[in-house]
Image (spheres, rainbow, N blue to C red):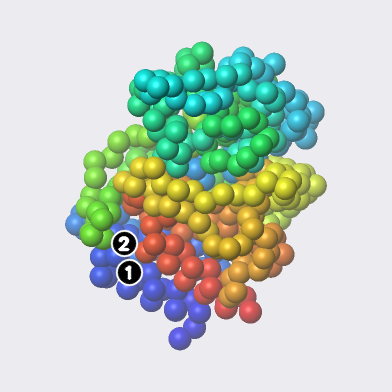
Amino acid sequence: MTARADIDAALQRATDIGAVPGVVAMATNGKDTIYEGAFGEKSLGSGATMEKDTVFWIASMTKAITATSCMQLVEQGRLGLDDDLGGLVPALATAKVLDSFDAAGKPVLRPANAPITLRRLLTHTAGFAYDMWNADMLAYSKQVPMPRHETFIKPEDCLPLAFDPGTRWAYGVNIDWAGKALEAVTGQSLDAYMQQNVCKPLGMNSTGYQLRPDISARLAGMHQRAPDGKLAPTAYDPPMDPATFLGGGGLYGSPGDYIRFIRMMLNQGTLDGVQVLKPETVALMGKNHMGDLNVEVMDTAIPTLSNTADFWPGMTKKWGLSFLINTRDVPGGRSADSLCWGGLRNTYFWIDPKRGVGGTIMTQILPWADPTVLGLYDELERGVYRMIG
């Protein structure tokens, strides 16, 4: 069998046996789409066939697009990577650290001792942490019950930091705040800015925060995997108020659209003659920006939403300007210093600048870091590298 046929067979087999309800995968060499395949159903038991233009909630794959938008402002001198963003976003000027809990279990907060900068937000070293991977934040959220998106509507209720800025890495709402800094600088909503300056120029016509009728009609269904491995459809519950436009998540998009974003990155900021970033900016985004700090294991605190995640155990991992970076070659796969990340409902992408290749795989399953989907992601990646030799 050819490498392409091997990928097809792996994805088809997974849907045939019900390991995943449906999946779309694509890869590019920067110029052309070198692999694309859609298998299974949009929603388990629906009979609706998964199509290559199916739309997915891409969740944290939003982060790279938000970072691209912010880096356009850095190029223009309107934002600085090491500026104290408290001057733009008042909530960041008064951020507090969750220091401990008192004898009654109430949170004890103290002022942060370092500024929150764009670099720290884009590298998840500013101190914000998602509660699904941080037990202290989960305990705090139970003490101060407020949906996460409301903390951006009422910034005086800003979620606390898990540690002082610049001292550790934790995956969190950092890039949501980067989006708020962009809105403060531009006077536009993140959605409006992103559509005008990234999505439309790149021809990402199925990507946006709002479920327009043409997007909704192609939307994949949501699923939950039970502890016994079985999948069940779940009612679609919008992740947040679309009007909130959070930079860390919330976008819907198609695999083909994200391939266009990957192609832009592989072509040093330009796609089909349209430049959205300078070559030096693309190179900068792919470098380690966390210094001696390292990416840590993401231990789950909410198993229904995420499994514990540790990609390439034993390998030192770094973070660029919104991307996870593997520091060594992956046998049979991506080169050292490749870029990647994913979205909560098991959508993933990678960009390998050294080999000039990248790809994406999309499903809609909770919890995140699903072993079955990660196995298919690996099959896709290995197959693509066999294709390109």
Instruction: Report the front residue among 324 and 133.
Output: 133
SS at circle 2: loop
Residue 193 placement (x, y as % from top left): 60, 29
Instruction: Report the front residue among 328 and 249.
Output: 328
Which residue occupies 51% across, 13% down?
Answer: 156
* Circle 2 residue: 20
Q: Are discs 1 and 2 less than 8 Å apart at CB?
A: yes
Residue 27 placement (x, y as % from top left): 54, 64
Label disc, if present, on residue 14 of the rendered structure: 1
Question: Looking at the image, can residue 209 be seen?
Answer: yes
Which residue sits furthest bottom? 1
Residue 377 placement (x, y as % from top left): 47, 64
Image quarter of the N terminus? bottom left
Image quadrant in which you'd find residue 210: top left
Which residue occupies 38% across, 57% down?
Answer: 370
Q: Mark 2: which amino acid?
A: Val
Is 289 located above or below residue 237 in the figure?
A: below
Instruction: Report the front residue among 372 and 57.
Output: 372
